[in-house]
Amino acid sequence: MIYYFSGTGNSLLVGRRLSERLGEQLCPMTAPMPTADDAIGLVFPVYAWGIPNIVEGFVRDFLKAFPQMDSAFLYAVMTCGDDMGYADRVLEAALGRKLDAAFSVQMPNVYVCLPGFDVDSKEVSSEKLSRVEGRTSEIAGKVRKREAARQLVRGRFAWLKTYVLRPLFNRSLLTDKYFNVDASLCTSCGKCRKACPVGNIKMSDGSPKWQSHCAGCLACYHACPHHAINFGRMTQKKGQFIYNLTIYYLLFIYDLTI
Ligand SMILES: Cc1cc2nc3c(=O)[nH]c(=O)nc-3n(C[C@H](O)[C@H](O)[C@H](O)COP(=O)(O)O)c2cc1C
């Protein structure tokens, strides 16, 4: 079984490719089903050099109750724009056990809410996406052989990022209270509501309203066809990653046959 969380589609793409290659079922962490499999995969994005709160909740409230938790081959595949810090160790702390294998996969960056952070150029996005087939094939090979692999891009100052910056980030920036809508651009299409993986957006008087249980994934920001949604004022001039992607990936996001 492969459990996944994905805000904007990257981890879903990686999860689907792994599920096809391994012949394993793919199940969202937001609606998890139990499994008796002896191999359990976790696929999700890196947030602030750690793991999304939703993944932490899934591990704590659901996964830890599995009878085979100590004996299963447990592996994590973490997608990130650049580097993941010690996200694997944050996950292991939540799990209360070591991972048997852990991988990071570089994917198009979607984080845009701080100065200096923006989506990748079209060229960089396409280059990262062109590596997905090879990378997922490599990971699937290692999982099939139950190899104790660690292929992780931690980046520079990994400890500082995970254990100093991440708590600050979670305390001050992991919130939906800064989202705002430019009423002159919003067409009330509701794509933001549909894109939200945790049902945190309600439409009221034709405008999105965030309900304070945000996963922080920025799916709403990226899904808006008119760039009407912003996070404070920081994102007004930032890109939306969806416009940088190849047709192949767009077809995938909209779940058309590829
Ligand atoms: C809140 C947030 C924090 C992020 N933090 C990191 C990070 O620490 N390092 C990194 O390389 N990418 C970071 N990213 C980028 C995502 O990890 C990356 O784009 C990922 O593939 C998105 O996956 P998804 O499309 O499945 O949601 C962050 C994205 C978000 C939304």
Image (cartoon, helix red, strand yellow):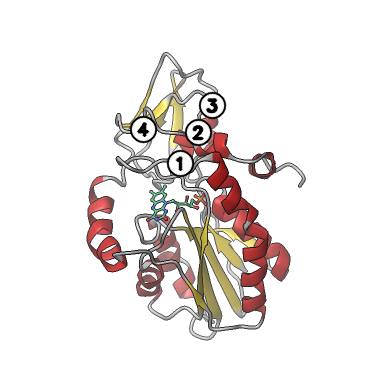
Looking at the image, the residue that sits furthest to the front is: 123
Q: Residue at x 29, y 36 (%)?
A: 177
Alpha-carbon distance for marks 1 and 2? 22 Å
User: Which numbered disc, 1 or 2, marks the residue closer to the eye?
Assistant: 1
Relative to the observer, which residue lies in front, 238 or 217?
238
Q: Which residue is mark 4?
A: 235
Q: Evaluate if marks 4 and 3 touch, with contact meaning CB atoms under 8 Å apart.
A: no
Q: CA distance from mark 4 to mark 3?
A: 15 Å
Q: Amino acid at mark 3?
A: Pro
The Cα atoms of the two marked residues, 1 and 4, are separated by: 11 Å
Extreme-top residue of the structure: 184
Ranked by sequence position, the earlier of labels 4 and 3 is: 3
Q: Earlier in the sequence, mark 3 or mark 1?
A: 1
Helix, strand or loop at mark 2: helix
Residue position marked by numbered label 2 in the rendering: 193
- The image quarter in which residue 225 lies: top right
Residue 213 numbered tag: none
First in sequence, mark 1 or 2: give its number.
1
Residue ID for mark 3: 225
User: Residue 171, relative to residue 112: is it above or below?
Assistant: below
Q: Give the vertical position of 254 relative to 32 (above or below).
A: above
**Which residue is the extreme one toward the right?**
257
CA–CA distance in space, label 2 to label 4: 19 Å
Give, as a three-letter code, the residue at label 4: Thr
Within 10 angstroms of label 3, few (less than 14), some, or many (20 or more) residues?
some
Q: Residues within 10 Å of mark 4 (few under 14, many from 20)?
A: many
Task: Assign a secondary structure to mark 4.
Answer: loop
